[in-house]
Structure formats: C-alpha cells, structure tokens
Image (cartoon, rainbow, N blue to C red):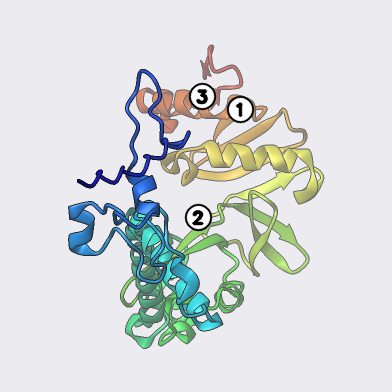
Amino acid sequence: MRRPTPLPPTAPPAAAERPSRGRPVDDTASRADDGLLAPVIPLGAAADGAGVDEARPDAYAGEPADEGADAAPIGIRDVWKAAHARRRALRAEVRRFTARQRRRRMVWIGVAASLLLLVLTTLAAAYSPLFAVEKVHVVGTSLLDAAAVEEALQSQVGTPLPLVDESAVKAALIAFPLVQSYSLEARPPHELVVRIVERLPVGLIETAAGYTLVDAAGVALSTTEKPAAGRPLLEIAGGTGSKAFEAVGQVMRALPATIRDQVTAISASTPDDVALTLGATDTQVIWGSADDSAMKALVLQKVMQSRPPESVSTYDVSSPNAVVVR
C-alpha cells in the first residue's frame, strides 16, 4: 500500500499583502499588476469615450489632454480680424449710448440751417429789384415846397431800399437852406419817406446885400432886396453871434404860432432886455431875459385872450408871476 504524496508547503503572504489591522486592504491594484485583473473603467465614461484620451491611451479621465498639440497656428490676419470686430462692436456701443445727444445735435443743426436760409432769402429779396424805390414821400414841411424836395430826390427811384445812397440824398437837400435835419424811412415794398425838420426863421437882419432871413442859430436862409412880408425886423446889438441874439432865438422858439405870426419887430441890446412889437397897433411886449420863456409865453397867451392888443399898449411879462398890462 502506497503512502500518499505530501502537498508542497504554502508560501507565507508578502508583507505588502498582509492586511493591516483595523482597515480593509484593496488588493485590486496588486492583482492587476499580476495580470489577473484589468483596470476598472466607469461605465459612463466608457460609454462616451471620455474616460481615456485617445491620443494618450495610458491617461485617465481626470488628466486634461493637451488641446493645442494638434491646433493650427494663429496668423496676423486672424489677429487683425479680431481687432476689427472689437472696434466695430465698440463703435456700436458708443453710438447706442450717444443716440440722444446726436438727435439733439441734429435738431440744433436743423434750426440753425433754417435761420440761415431765412436770412439769406430775406437779404436776397431786399437787395433785389422787388424792393426798389418807386415813390419818394416828403413829410414835415411847412415853409418848404414838398413837391420841389421830392423832385430833387428822384435820382433814388429804381434803387433797392437798402441801397439808397444817403450821401446823394444829403447833397440834394443841401440846396434847401430851411432843412435843419432829416431822416430816411423805408416803407416796403416801394416807398421812401423823407422826414424833414425845418429851421425856425427868427427874422430879418438888414445887411449890405439887402434883408437876410436868419433862423435861431443865425443861419442865413434867404436874402431879398426888400423885407419879406410876415417876417419881423431884428435890431440886435452884436449881430447874430451875440448873447442877445441867442436869447431872441430862445424866445421865438417858445412863442406859440398864433403870437409869433403877430410879431413885426424884435429888439435886444443885452440878453436880459428882449422886447417884441405886435402887429399894426405897435403893442410892446417886455419879455426880459430868456429864462422861463415857456411860462411867459403861456401867461402872455392867456392875458391876450382877455385883453387883446388893440386895447393894450404894453404887456410886461418879465416877471411871469406878476404880469403888468398898460
């Protein structure tokens, strides 16, 4: 009877494979190294191929792959296109945020353009024959013949109103000594108005050439051989350049027309003894100085209404608060 062959003794486990006390040991890795087990791959990752990088078979899902390894190089054209797109996007944003400001600017530009167009149109029409002078009208004359003045200004007919030659108008009016001042007024579309202020004739001064009619400033208006009817004779010490003549001029300007037309003579040796002679009755008006001439004229007018010159020889208004009638 044969004896059974004894079994070989079992080798003791390695120190690394010995389980540690108190915790389990995962021997999957060691068994994989021995070729007994394959690496474990999660089902989800294996299904879509995300667990293992095809370019790196030995890489696991947790390790990133080198994405730029197979990418094409970036050229200057690509950089230029990106910069151009960025600038275009920036301009679009700027236009969006400044839309209100641009609308306001366009409104102001439109208003300014409209005003400029209106001004240019008005000037073009004003300086065109559409507004040419067709009639000259003279106003403010009493001693002057208005028709004669209008005839002298006929050279302005046909001239656009803004282009009326004021120097030519002045040269034409110099021929009329009674014109003290004047002003021009344009009345579109075709009328030119000339407003004249006449000189106030004071009286006649006897000279070697005859009798010269002068105004309150001593300007000679006309000269005749004989005294003009309705003009008082002046007997002024010192002539037209004296203080006495200046006082006479102030008195004549203060007199109302109803009394001035009755004066036939004026005398003054000083500025304080002006005297007037009224009408055919030779009634004397003692005026005194030119002070308070407006008040003296008003008082004299009232006294003459109650006491006409035919019944009076002298009116003394040198003191307007105490008038003396003789």
The local crowd at label 2, few if under 14, some if 14 to 19, many if 20 or more residues have their Cα within 10 Å, is few
Specify the quadrant of the image occupied by residue 307. Answer: top left
In the shown orientation, is residue 72 left or right of residue 305? right
In the shown orientation, is residue 278 left or right of residue 122? right
Q: CA distance from mark 2 to mark 3?
A: 25 Å
On residue 286, the disc is 1
The local crowd at label 1, few if under 14, some if 14 to 19, many if 20 or more residues have their Cα within 10 Å, is some
Asked whether residue 83 appears in the rendered view, the answer is no
Q: Which residue is mark 3?
A: 295
Foreground residue among 98 and 43:
43
On residue 201, the disc is none
Along the polypeptide, which appears first: circle 1 or circle 3? 1
Q: Label 3 near label 2: C-beta < 8 Å?
A: no
Camera-side mark, 1 or 3: 3
Q: CA distance from mark 1 to mark 2?
A: 21 Å
Camera-side mark, 2 or 3: 3
Please name the amino acid that badge 1 sits on. Ile
Please name the amino acid that badge 3 sits on. Met
Q: At 40% from the left edge and 53% from the top edge, which residue is drawn? A: 33
Residue 217 x/y as whole percent: 68, 51
Q: Label 2 near label 1: C-beta < 8 Å?
A: no
In the shown orientation, is residue 208 left or right of residue 100? right
Residue 303 x/y as whole percent: 42, 23
Please name the amino acid that badge 2 sits on. Gly
Along the polypeptide, which appears first: circle 1 or circle 2? 2
